[in-house]
Image (cartoon, coloured by chain):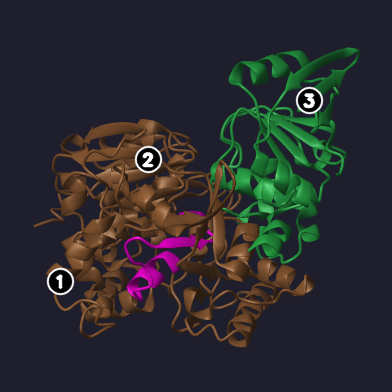
Amino acid sequence: MKQFGGPLLFLNRSDINTDEIIPAKYLTEISKEALKPYCLEDLKLPDFNPKTDVPGKAAILTRANFGCGSSREHAPWALEVNGINVVVAESFARIFRQNMYNCGLLAIELPASTIEDLFKTFYGKPTTLKVDIEQGRLTFLSEGVSKEVSFTLSDFERALVKAGGWVQFAAERY
Amino acid sequence: MSGQPKTLVEKIFDTHLIDKPFGEAWVLRLDMVFCHEITTPVAINDLVSRGMDRVFDPTRIKAVIDHVTPAKDSKTALQGKILRDWARRHGIKDFFDVGRNGVCHALFPEKGFVRPGYTIIMGDSHTCTHGAFGAFAAGVGTTDLEVGILKGVCAFKPPRTMRINLNGKLAPDVSAKDVILTVIATIGVAGATDRVMEFGGPVVDALSMEGRMTLCNMAVEAGATSGICMPDMTTVEYLWPFIGPEGEARYGTKEEALEDFKKWWSDPDASYESVIDIDCSTIRPLSTVGYKPDQVVPIEKMEKIWVDQVYIGSCTNGRIEDLREAARVLKGRKIADTVRGIVSPATPAVYAQALQEGIIQIFMDAGFCVTNPTCGACLGMSNGVLAEGEVCASTTNRNFYGRMGKGGMVHLMSPANAAATAIAGYITTPEALGITSKV
């Protein structure tokens, strides 16, 4: 199975929508790779500049209801082509969450108090996220400080991640 | 359908279940897969590259070019071409191209493709609109769409139903748009995530199919998988040209059709995850402020907000009833010099009906630009994109930052309020302008 996680990007707000992740004007692209320069372009947050903060990141930590709005799978694709393969949040919008697993990417939900604690501990510091899918364990690591958090995947989500997505799974089964 | 009492959605899941590969994932057989030119081409290309360029059933796939039409540049022309070539190659008869195309969620119901008890997916979040007919209709991403096209199946979590009782009676100048904005403001933008919102009560009973579509259309703005209404005589009347003697002749009489539709009704003792009661009699004309659809205020309590553009159209409010509602306000009046008014009738049939009723003339006399049917302006793709710092009063469904153009501000409201706003130049209501728009 492929490796998940790496340098962490903090997006400190709830309800980040898919228009902010990838604006509709780029939906005229028909390749995933073409979305790469525009990831999170319309997201306005203090201490966040998509041009400099997205490159090199492999994981996102954010708040509640991430990926709300449009059904566009261009949102997970924009993350994927930038090397981001796991998003950790308090909660996700349904379609975005399913799109992540359908692409073989991870959308991991943690309790609000845990998310709050992680922001308190690591926000503003260069942080790395390690993901152990077999053990169901996330390790956040920064400047000698580390925190371990456990997570669970449903059997379906685990199967999709292992199969590398829903198309292959369904094509073989139905 | 015996055994324990069930909700409408539970009945649809039971009758369409084909596999439970894992406890929490129910794989359902799909009655319809709808496609448009923005999210489908990538799925088509992926199927081709996997050597699986097939469709499960060309009669159950419906396709339309609607987001950018006619094409505005080479990229959108290519998206249209990929969809068009694919539809021809697979014998998808119901493909709607320039001249016959319209906003998907207005066009497909109008063609009779949506029926009570159906399962429907589309690569578009506002697919929940079709729940107005008592169907389970859900927006999905391109991968789910791709599997739907190939195999006619889609996986969902077992449904949890929220019952939303819309009680009372709407005041004049208050419409389905104000009702759904109230619901979203009540439960929040994630208040119905992974849930189906079942709308019922006297307000729903009194709404037309157009109004119910407006209601269900914005269920996703509260995070819902779908909105849904019980099919009743209003549903039968709407579908009669397709199901009666002039159509498939499935039913001899309307009463017979209604009796059959009732099998989908939620059982009286069905259990809901939650029940929310809303007194709709007290709803005042509303507008959103800010960048989330749950940030809603009565217009009469807003400070004066000047607008640069007024947009009437979209899958939320571009149907004939919406145009009539706006035209009643605009009739014999001019929009403010400072306002660009744009109206996009949602389908060719809506356009033709509006022409016949003199509504298009009213819009033009008032100073509106009338565009062809398209989604364009709603998501800032074409036909009315905002410039940085501009403000738009819009009958659409999303007020996200930059939604209608980078750096633009969107205020969501009903067609009547949008029309009044166009006349005044600032956000207002027909009542505040002394216009009686309902008789």
Q: Is residue B169 visible?
A: yes
Q: Which chain is brown?
A: B
Residue that carries the numbered disc 1 in the rendered image? B254
Chain on which label 1 sits: B
Say what amino acid the circle numbered 2 marks: Thr
- Cα separation between marks 1 and 2: 29 Å
Question: In the image, are marks 1 and 2 on the same chain?
Answer: yes
Residue that carries the numbered disc 3 in the rendered image? A138
Residue name at image x 24 percent, y 62 percent: B261
Position of residue B299 in the picture relative to residue B410 (left or right)? left
Specify the label residue B161 is tagged with.
2
Comparing B46 with B174, the one in front is B46
Q: What stretch is highlighted in magenta?
A: B104-126
Element under disc 2? strand
Chain on which label 3 sits: A
Q: Is residue B231 visible?
A: no
Does the magenta portion include B117? yes
Element under disc 1? helix
- Cα separation between marks 2 and 3: 33 Å
Q: Which chain is green?
A: A
Element under disc 3? strand
